[in-house]
Image: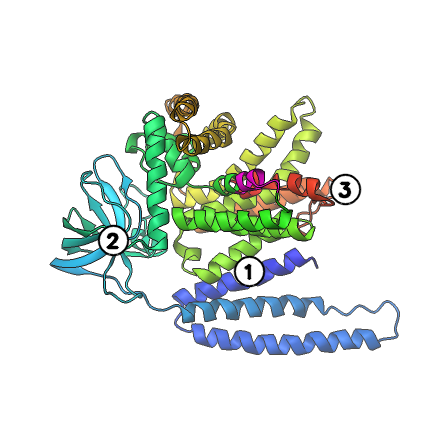
Amino acid sequence: MSTHFKTLILVAGVCLGIVVGEISKVASEVGIFAVILFLIQTGIYFWERKRKQMSDAAGVTHLFSFPLITILFSVGLFLGILRVQLVSEKINYVCETSCTFNAKIISSSETKNDYQVFNVHPIDSPSEVLDVQIKAPLYPKYKIGEALTLSGKVLVPEILPSHTEKKSFDYSSYLITKNIGSEMFYPKIELLNSGTNSFASVLGRWKENMIEKINLYVSSPSSSLASGMLFGNSSISKELNQTFRVAGLSHIIVLSGFNIAIVISFILFVFAFLPLFIRVILASASVILFVIMVGGEASVVRATLMAFIALLATIIGREYFALQALVISFLLILIYEPSSLMNDVSFHLSFLATAGIVYLSNPINIFFKEYFTYIKSKTFISTLSTTLSAYIITLPYLMYTFGSVSIYALLSNILVLPFVPITMLISFLVVVTSYVSQTVAMVFGYVDTLIINLMIWIAKVIEHLPFSYLSFQISLIGMFTIYFFVVVIINFILKKSSDNSFLSGTQENIKIKNETERLKSEGVLTDIISY
């Protein structure tokens, strides 16, 4: 039994434990049962193992691996329940009649069509109090760290009713995963002071300054798309957001792991004269600062954890196992924020897309090489397999959660995705050069505008194709049924290959022998970590 499979069993137990802890009234009893099961199975495991060692009979098989599986699962089940039990109860800051309170802005303002959105935390409130999301007029612009006096109603978000047969969206539970418990709509706002210069506020204002640089040198609406891809500042218009959603390109307008890849690559390149160990430390510290600056979005946290594992593998000269890194990062995020398992849609999509690339890109590559031998371009096959892997694995979840399907998503991703890393790199260069030379920044900004305008044009063309967006709702059972058949089909393809196995979790690994090969091996960041 492979290490990866053992880890999967443990994570499955943790997931079930979190679900039981969240929804069941007998979670404590189930946790006690898991401990008892663990003790019993541990005893059976060591007894069977000792029996096997003492057995002289040839050909006797002792199946002590079955208790090992149940040991791992019961441990995971107990840990999941325990983690939920240890979560401190969050308190919503609510006043259904108009009230006045002081609060500090804790997130950068994001511009929507005709209003701005930012989060505040009531001053002098205990840490258990959830943040409040504010929707205010576009002007004046408010900045992170400022202290405000707010007057108005503070209400808990309601479940958004569906206008069709689709299920309702529990918006309140989704906001709680972002530590937001209530909302205020167009309150009366008075600026108290510019706030304290805390570390997070300084980083947040630095991000706001860099977004202003992009807005200065990149023309609108390309600037909003560039700042969204680079810093997660989702200030694009509703119309453009709808265009990218219909075209199946919504994932490129938010933060992704490619941001982490850019930061790491930039640090490793700039400090190439330093020893590898020092460069890795600097890259890790830079990534931590970047995550604090942009906020802990699911895709960024997942990519950060995977990047740290890759960097650690680079230092010690070990192979980087993307499969194991993905599962470990998944487990760590669940331990940190267990509510993400059931309510965080961005968390689900981020891990599903990455899991699709990790598990499916290799068999899809094998399939194309065996049955489409006339395709000679390795780059095209790699792009197609990466895109198709993420599309296949996320499609059932999208149909279940949103009740819709983007028919041309595969086509649009094949056309647009090659421009994404180029665009993000040029946007990054716009910011960097703006502090050195305005002329160079203008040149990069002009090129960036051209490329992003091309991406927007492709999305708009696909949006107006016939049947570009269809409503297609499936049940939870239907979603798992589709995933079951996907596993069966992929396993069938892999069985035709002599040196691959889906169920054992093995795949072709990159052997790191020296520093040059180590740095080359970080190319995995652009495919797996960066999605």
- Of mark 2 and mark 3, the one earlier in the sequence is 2
- Measure how far apart labels 1 and 3 are at the Cα level: 29 Å
Question: Left or right of 63: which side holds 283?
Answer: left
Give how far across and how far down residue 438 sits, in percent. 38, 26
- Of mark 1 and mark 3, the one earlier in the sequence is 1
The 10 Å Cα crowd at callout 1, few under 14, some 14 to 19, many 20 or more, is many
Is residue 136 covered in magenta? no
Kind of residue indicated by mark 2:
Gly
Q: Under tag 1, what secondary structure?
A: helix
Is residue 266 covered in magenta? yes
Which-is-in-front pick, marks 2 and 1? Answer: 2
On the image, numbered disc 3 is attached to which residue?
498
Q: Which region is colored magenta? A: 264-273
Kind of residue indicated by mark 1:
Val
- Measure how far apart labels 2 and 3 are at the Cα level: 63 Å
Give how far across and how far down residue 120 sits, in percent. 26, 54
Q: Nearer the viewer, residue 36 or 186?
A: 186
Kind of residue indicated by mark 3:
Ser
On the image, numbered disc 2 is attached to which residue?
195
The 10 Å Cα crowd at callout 2, few under 14, some 14 to 19, many 20 or more, is some
The quadrant holding residue 28 is: bottom left
On the image, numbered disc 1 is attached to which residue?
11
Q: Under tag 3, what secondary structure?
A: loop
* Residue 472 in view, yes or no: no
Question: Left or right of 234: which side holds 305?
Answer: right
Q: Nearer the viewer, residue 270 or 523?
A: 270
